[in-house]
């Protein structure tokens, strides 16, 4: 059979690359949906681990634990993907997400649920920057707008699907089913992603068909020290002395040990009643240590799984060179040295201080948590230590000079501002609906937000298409943020009957209201800004830093969301208390029947509306700041593209 020509190989590589992106986007969608599923599943989870609904404050770690895992480890994961390639880190994130899902699904105590959700956050959060960096290495700057829009769209689509499918599962089955479903889905997506990658390699005869970070970054002369290259950038942890596609023997021993160990641990945690209650097999599920929240890991079945994984580690360290190792752990010390673990720990501690300060605060009383007097000085010390470490480390986690271009730090500033505005929509639009039109229906109030949520992925796709003209990026981002700001400004004038007032054209009702249009326009505006912001940071840093730079942009948005929620809610609550102080008491308003005082109820609702109007106005300001920053800072994206590109970047996927 004739070998395919260069054009045929490139065509096949393009097709397989698009499939690989589709599977990566599917994983991002799964993780994004899981982020929001706790919104509806939290009461059931609390009951399942022995917490009463009246102890909601004790369930806070379930949310904050996920946020910690999601935010704190993102820079390290992005850096590792720059060193060892996108595929190993992507698959590792899926494994972490699946492991966290297993822990959560089998948890019977709060501590195990918190740990499971933290591991889920770590894995799920890492998928986003790795996928963005994958797009950057497979598509050239002039054509990567649309795939970046696709990634942004599926990420936002998760916020729509997560609560809906979570509510459906909780209604039809147990809350644990939500997390059990993640296991086969994660496995299927991971296998499909790897198969697509192998197909791409076969289509190109083992050569890189794109400006891939796994090849381009390593061949860029003068961009990295020899110590960093030896830390895994050329071969990483892919397969020991045999590269993919070499003639080494498959690592069947490692595969059996890894799958067997994972399966035994999963079976031990699952503890199916038919086996646990069996006279013959039940002894294998008898804990060796009682009275612990982690008792499931002390059963003979689970311990056998741990032993098998230990044997897997020993095998991968000592396997003969004739095997293509699944995971060449001998390279791990060099890779971790290149990843700058001390720097990663300092940055993770700094981000943890920020997350805890905002996520554990009571917005009705404070902007930040009561622990802030301790956390703030600690954060300052950690920040100073991190900068000191990065300036002196041989292989820093983040080359501080790499973010000096305005497009790089400007993208983070824009995401920080837009994140603050975004939370106002996610939290306060349902609150407004519950206060006005749906006082007795939480579901009805939540469904009002769907107008906004559905429009965000539509806007993300549109923004990606518009960004195919690279020079349009700043204007698209600024335009989207401006549209969102105008929509929030309109929301700040919503009255009590706003959600129930239909829109009339030519004297006839058209079936939906002005608020529906404003919510959709607001979501569309947020979506339009996603691809240009991501493209700006990717265009402004060297390819070898795409992973860590993408991670920092995601971190900026997450921090903006947390800070925006606390700050805007605190401002709104202050406005509410000021308005409430002017109302008077039911005794003065309704002296005849203080217990039933419509005048007091109307005045209180009006005060609540003033609170929400203040929040929406603040969100408009945040979005407006994002628009100004986008126009001023993102218009320098072409600077990075003027630098000489590695040779392999001439064959990027269009």
Image (cartoon, rainbow, N blue to C red):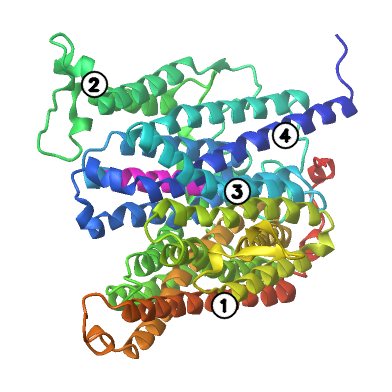
Whether residue 571 is visible: yes
As measured in the structure, the alpha-carbon distance from the residue carrying label 4 to the one carrying label 3 is: 19 Å
Seen in the picture, residue 573 relative to 296 is either above or below; the reply is: below
Q: Are marks 1 and 2 in contact (CB under 8 Å)?
A: no
In the image, residue 268 lies in the stretch drawn in magenta:
no
* Tag 4 residue: 17
* Tag 2 residue: 301
Q: Front-most of 627 and 597?
A: 597
Seen in the picture, residue 70 relative to 607 is either above or below; the reply is: above
As measured in the structure, the alpha-carbon distance from the residue carrying label 2 to the one carrying label 3 is: 38 Å
In the image, residue 119 lies in the stretch drawn in magenta:
yes
* Tag 1 residue: 493
- Secondary structure under tag 2 reads helix
Mark 1 Cα-neighbour bin, 10 Å: few <14, some 14–19, many ≥20: some
Q: Position of residue 212 (x, y in %)?
A: 71, 42
As measured in the structure, the alpha-carbon distance from the residue carrying label 4 to the one carrying label 1 is: 48 Å
Quadrant where the C terminus lies? Answer: top right
Q: Front-most of 19 and 289?
A: 19
Quadrant where the N terminus lies? Answer: top right
Which numbered disc covers residue 82?
A: 3
Q: Position of residue 67 (x, y in %)?
A: 41, 56
Between circles 1 and 2, the one closer to the viewer is 1
Q: Earlier in the sequence, mark 2 or mark 4?
A: 4
Q: Earlier in the sequence, mark 2 or mark 3?
A: 3
Q: Which residues are magenta?
A: 113-126
Q: Is residue 227 left or right of residue 100?
A: right
Between circles 3 and 1, the one closer to the viewer is 1
């Amino acid at each position: 059979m004739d070998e395919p020509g260069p054009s045929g190989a490139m065509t096949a590589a393009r097709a397989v690359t698009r499939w690989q992106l589709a599977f990566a986007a599917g994983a991002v969608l799964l993780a994004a949906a899981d982020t929001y599923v706790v919104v509806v599943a939290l009461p059931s989870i609390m009951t399942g681990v022995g917490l009463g609904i009246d102890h909601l404050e004790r369930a806070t770690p379930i949310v904050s634990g996920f946020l910690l895992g999601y935010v704190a480890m993102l820079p390290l994961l992005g850096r590792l993907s720059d060193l060892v390639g996108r595929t190993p880190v992507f698959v590792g994130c899926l494994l972490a997400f699946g492991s966290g899902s297993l822990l959560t699904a089998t948890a019977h105590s709060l501590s195990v649920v918190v740990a499971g959700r933290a591991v889920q956050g770590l894995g799920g959060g890492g998928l986003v920057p790795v996928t963005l960096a994958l797009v950057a290495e497979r598509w050239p700057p002039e054509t990567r707008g649309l795939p970046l829009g696709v990634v942004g769209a599926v990420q936002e689509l998760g916020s729509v699907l997560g609560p809906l499918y979570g509510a459906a599962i909780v209604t039809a089955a147990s809350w644990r089913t939500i997390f059990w479903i993640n296991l086969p889905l994660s496995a299927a997506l991971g296998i499909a992603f790897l198969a697509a990658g192998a197909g791409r390699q076969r289509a190109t005869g083992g050569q890189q068909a794109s400006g891939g970070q796994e090849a381009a970054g390593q061949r860029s002369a003068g961009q990295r020290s020899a110590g960093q290259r030896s830390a895994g950038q050329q071969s990483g942890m892919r397969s020991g002395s045999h590269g993919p596609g070499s003639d080494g023997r498959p690592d069947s021993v490692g595969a059996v040990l890894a799958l067997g160990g994972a399966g035994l641990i999963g079976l031990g945690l699952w503890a199916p009643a038919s086996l646990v209650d069996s006279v013959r097999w039940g002894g294998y599920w008898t804990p060796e240590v009682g009275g612990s929240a982690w008792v499931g890991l002390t059963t003979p079945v689970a311990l056998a799984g741990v032993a098998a994984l230990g044997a897997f580690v020993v095998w991968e360290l000592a396997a003969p060179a004739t095997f293509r190792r699944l995971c060449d752990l001998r390279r791990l010390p060099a890779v971790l040295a290149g990843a700058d673990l001390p720097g990663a720990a300092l940055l993770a501690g700094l981000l943890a201080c920020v997350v805890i300060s905002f996520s554990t605060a009571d917005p009705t009383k404070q902007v930040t948590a009561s622990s802030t007097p301790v956390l703030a000085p600690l954060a300052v010390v950690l920040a100073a230590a991190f900068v000191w470490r990065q300036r002196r480390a041989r292989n820093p986690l983040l080359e501080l000079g790499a973010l000096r271009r305005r497009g790089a730090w400007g993208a983070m500033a824009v995401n920080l501002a837009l994140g603050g505005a975004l939370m106002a929509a996610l939290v306060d639009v349902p609150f407004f609906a519950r206060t006005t039109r749906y006082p007795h229906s939480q579901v009805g109030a939540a469904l009002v937000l769907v107008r906004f949520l559905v429009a965000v992925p539509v806007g993300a796709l549109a923004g990606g298409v518009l960004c195919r003209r690279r020079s349009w990026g700043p204007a698209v981002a600024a335009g989207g943020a401006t549209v969102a700001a105008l929509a929030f400004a309109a929301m700040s004038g919503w009255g009590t009957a706003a959600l129930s007032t239909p829109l009339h054209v030519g004297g006839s009702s058209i079936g939906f209201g002005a608020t529906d249009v404003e919510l959709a326009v607001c979501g569309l505006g947020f979506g339009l800004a996603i691809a240009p912001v991501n493209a700006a940071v990717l265009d402004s840093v060297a390819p070898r830093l795409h992973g860590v730079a993408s991670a920092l942009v995601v971190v900026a948005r997450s921090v903006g969301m947390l800070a925006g929620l606390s700050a805007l809610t605190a401002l709104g609550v202050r406005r509410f208390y000021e308005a409430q102080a002017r109302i008077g008491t039911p005794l003065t308003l309704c002296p005849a029947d203080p217990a039933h005082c419509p005048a007091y109820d109307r005045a209180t609702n009006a005060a609540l509306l003033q609170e929400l109007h203040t929040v929406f106005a603040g969100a408009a300001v945040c979005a407006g700041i994002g628009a100004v920053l986008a126009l001023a800072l993102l218009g320098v994206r072409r600077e990075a593209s003027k630098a000489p590109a590695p040779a392999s970047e001439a064959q990027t996927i269009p």
